[in-house]
Amino acid sequence: MSEDEIKIKINKFIPYFVFCFGFFMIVLGLGIREDYFLILVVSLIMGLIFAFIFYLIFQKPERLELGEEEIEDSEKDIREMEIEYEIINMGDRRRKREIREEAERRLYGKSSDKKRISLTTEEKEMIFDKFNNKCAICNTEEGLHIHHKDQNPQNNRLDNLLVLCGVCHKKVHMKVR
């Protein structure tokens, strides 16, 4: 630490000390009226202690200059935290699904035991290409879903699948159309 930096730190510390020293002089002066030397010494010590505490609490940290390596390391750390967060959320979604299934069993005496068989990326692309990347009902090209005509998520035969936008998909399941 250079001499100038030390002077700056001392100059920042002085107002805290003056305030604390004056405060303890007044407080102790009200309680101890006869021994002024004791008041002065105790006020000096307490002023230094509390000024140092205030200095540590209220000091603004120095600007941190990061190099490219530190920035890359920080970005990697942030990415790791995001991955950990997603893992936690995935477990939470699984737990919520299990709770929903149990609630359905209790309410209706059954649950949707039809376990979905996932389509591969190639299969999904083939289905979207078959429908020209458009909703089979309204021809929109955004927010597309793959719908099972027989409502069986295990039946992934091509003749059982339709491409629908989110709005039309919801309407089909609500039997609006």
Image (cartoon, rainbow, N blue to C red):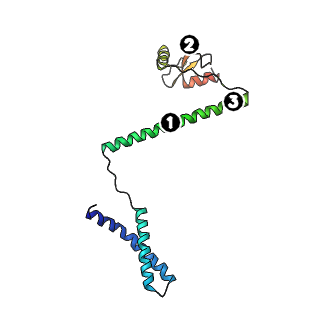
Which quarter of the image is occupied by the C terminus?
top right
Q: Residue at 34%, 56% (x, y): give it.
A: 62
Q: Quadrant of residue 13?
A: bottom left
C-alpha gap between disc 1 and disc 2: 32 Å
**Label 3 crowding class (10 Å Cα cut-off): few <14, some 14-19, many 20+?**
some
Q: Which mark is residue 86?
A: 1
Relative height, residue 26 to residue 88 (above, below)? below
Under mark 3, the amino acid is Glu
Which quarter of the image is occupied by the N terminus?
bottom left
Q: Nearer the viewer, residue 142 or 58?
A: 58
C-alpha gap between disc 3 and disc 2: 28 Å
Q: Residue at 58%, 14% (x, y): give it.
A: 160
Q: Which residue is mark 3?
A: 104
Q: Which mark is residue 157?
A: 2
In this rendering, position of residue 86 left or right of residue 155: left
Q: Nearer the viewer, residue 160 or 83?
A: 83
